[in-house]
Image (tube, grey):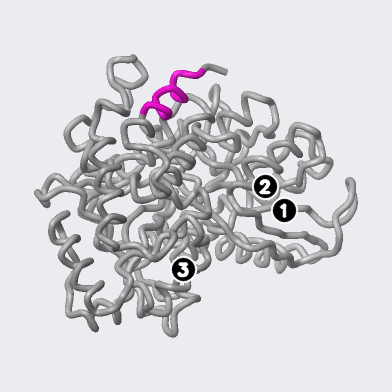
Amino acid sequence: MASEIIRTPFSRRRLLQLMGGAAAAGALASCGGGNSSGGSSGPLKVIGAGSQEAGLRKALDEYKKQNGSFEFNLSFSPADQLQTALRAQLAAGNAPDLHAVYPGNGSAMSMVQLSKANLLADLSEQAWTQKIPAGFKGAYQQDGKTHIFSPGTSVLGAIYNKKAFAKAGVEIPTTWSELLTVCETLKKKGIIPLALGAQTPWVTQLINYALVPGTVYAKQPDFDDKMAAGSETFAGSGWADAMNKYLELQKRGFFNDNPNGTTYEQATSMVGTGKAAMAVQVSAVLQAYRAAAPSPDDLGMFPLPATDVAADNWIPGGIVVGLGVSAKSKKADEARKFLEFCGQPEQINAWAEAVACVPLYSEGEAKVDPVLKPFLPYLADDKAVPFMDQRWPNAEVQPTHFAVVQELLGGKTTVEGALKKMDDAYKKTA
């Protein structure tokens, strides 16, 4: 994967305030590195999210090189299965030793939810945890204890096929109106403007996540605090503008046919092959899009504009999906040793580079994928906010969001009805 050293001009302090847990990962199950799992003997059983694959495989393989007796059994699960089947396994005490965990709060497999249920081992004694800046602690720690390892910060925007853009003669848009014009031109050229795999639940949220920083947070940076205080609602905010724009893209025919019947993998293939020009996605899955393209250089990424004033457009950014150790694992010590290895600066850099994210910390200059260059000015100018679910108070809002977007796309609800359901879910207490 193409990479280079980028001298990051943005405020490190501001970057390290970006905390988020967007559930963005889906892949077919795959295994490697060991035999079948079992008890306290045998290989370490690891279940990851799809967006972790490039970095997690690299880390496991490197650890095995340095520890010849180490064996592992690695598989990957779609996000919805992580949220249901894996959570049930954790509660029953038969979960994998090491598994995907989402940063912060907001989902059933988030660090806060799992640590409150005493399902995650404490990692606080590991040296790398002392390098977590204050702005990141809410994503990694609960009650002062670290329960998750994550290599760094991902951004969310439009992954695009450069050849498709060139064929249609269009340029990267910087305002919402320009985006609509670009989409119309692409459509007239016979190219699907935006691939949307909404059959895969976690994909449904991404367009809203890309638009809400501009429609909500640019005007109300303290929106999350107001929501928590009960003085603001989804329905009465710029969330309505974002959802209406989401529907406008559909009504103008800018998505592929039947988004609710299209998977993440199918949408990835559409963009990689140039059948579709764009998909709104997190940078952590860029590797999968590159793998679907004839050449990785065919693909780029840019911030998705949400407003007609370029200066008012903000971006979402958040810590990528991490790993936690099952509190009931019989191989917890071995799992902890692996995470301590992952926390070394050279390993963090390697993992971050593999999944196109900005590393948690770096001794010297960090390696940052060139695809992130268009996003760096937003980080520098404090125009970035965490993935929305990071500040949601429970694990009810996110699946409600998934469901209402599918209902919107299927014509089964209105924006008002969708946001009311999200407000109702937000008010639920454990």
In the picture, measured across the screen, residue 164 lies left or right of residue 369, that is left
* SS majority, magenta: helix
Nearer the observer, 327 or 49: 49
Image quarter (top left, top right, bottom left or bottom right) of the N terminus: bottom left
Element at badge 2?
strand
Q: For the residue labelled by badge 3, is the local secondary structure a helix, a strand or a loop?
A: helix
The residue singled out by tag 1 in the image is 46
Name the residue located 37 percent from the left edge and 19 percent from the top edge: 228
- Separation of residues labelled 3 and 1 (CA atoms): 25 Å
Q: Residue at x 32, y 61 (%)?
A: 158
Q: Where 133 falls versus 246 (above or below)?
A: above
Q: Residues within 10 Å of mark 1 (few under 14, many from 20)?
A: many
Indicate left or right for 111 with 389 as reference: right
Q: Disc 3 designates what residue? A: 268
Instruction: Of the two numbered discs 2 and 1 on the same chain, state the one appearing first in sequence.
Output: 1
Is residue 382 one of those drawn in magenta?
Answer: no
Q: Mark 3 Cα within 10 Å, few/some/many (few <14, many 20+)?
A: many
Q: Quadrant of residue 179?
A: bottom left
Picture disc at residue 99: 2
Marks 2 and 3 sit apart, C-alpha to C-alpha, by 25 Å
Left or right: 189 in relation to 181: right
Give, as a single range, the part of the protein colored magenta: 420-428
Which callout, 2 or 3, points at the residue further toward the start of the chain?
2
